[in-house]
Amino acid sequence: MKQERVFQNTFAPECENHELSVGQIIVGLGFGAFKYRKLPPEVRKAVDEEMRRRVKKREAHPYVDDSKRRIKMLKAAQSAMQQSSEKGVCDAAGVGAGKKKAMAERTRQKVSGVSAPMAQA
């Protein structure tokens, strides 16, 4: 991997760094900390080269927008959670058919704040 070029900071007196890499300069340009026209010519040339390199890299690996697929999966999961019934909860917990009624009663008691001994199934 090629090491990023570093320049002496002679163009941004408000910046405390004595040296700035091309990447830092690009970030500073993006935030408006530096003005492109006020950069020295060799720094502008390095910034231009780095930006061309980044564009080529991005074109070689295009972004895949899968946000619609993710939203669909989240909605399906939310729907499944809303549709889960007492039976589904019992099945997920591995409770047998004979204990489902007792488990449901305990759950209702816990939710209502009543603590009762476990019912015999």
Image: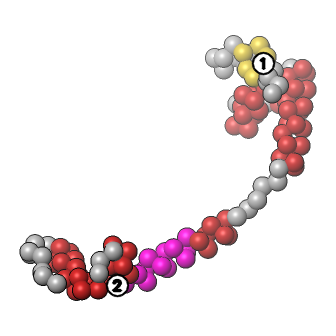
Q: Position of residue 106 (x, y in %)?
A: 18, 78
Tag count? 2
Q: Of 31 and 76, which appears nearest the observer?
A: 76
76 relative to 65 in the view: left or right: left
- Disc 1 crowd rating (10 Å Cα; few below 14, some 14-19, many 20+) is some
In primary-sequence order, the first of circles 1 and 2 is: 1
Q: Quadrant of the C terminus?
A: bottom left
Q: Position of residue 52 (x, y in %)?
A: 89, 38
- Disc 2 crowd rating (10 Å Cα; few below 14, some 14-19, many 20+) is some
Q: Mark 1 and 2 residues: CB-CB less than 8 Å, in contact?
A: no
Main secondary structure along the magenta-highlighted residues: helix
Q: Position of residue 107 (x, y in %)?
A: 22, 77
Q: Amino acid at mark 2?
A: Lys
Where disc 1 sits, the SS reads: strand
Where disc 2 sits, the SS reads: helix
Residue at the disc numbered 2: 87
Q: Quadrant of the N terminus?
A: top right
42 relative to 13 in the view: left or right: right
69 over 11 or under it: above or below: below
Q: Is residue 37 magenta?
A: no
In space, the residues marked 1 and 2 are separated at their CA atoms by: 65 Å
118 relative to 13 in the view: left or right: left
Q: Amino acid at mark 1?
A: Val
Disc marking residue 6: 1
In which quarter of the view is residue 8 placed? top right
Q: Is residue 82 magenta?
A: yes
Which residue range is magenta in the image?
74-85
Q: Residue at x 59, y 71 (%)?
A: 73
Disc marking residue 16: none
Residue 24: in sight, yes or no? yes
Q: Of 12 and 71, which appears nearest the observer?
A: 71
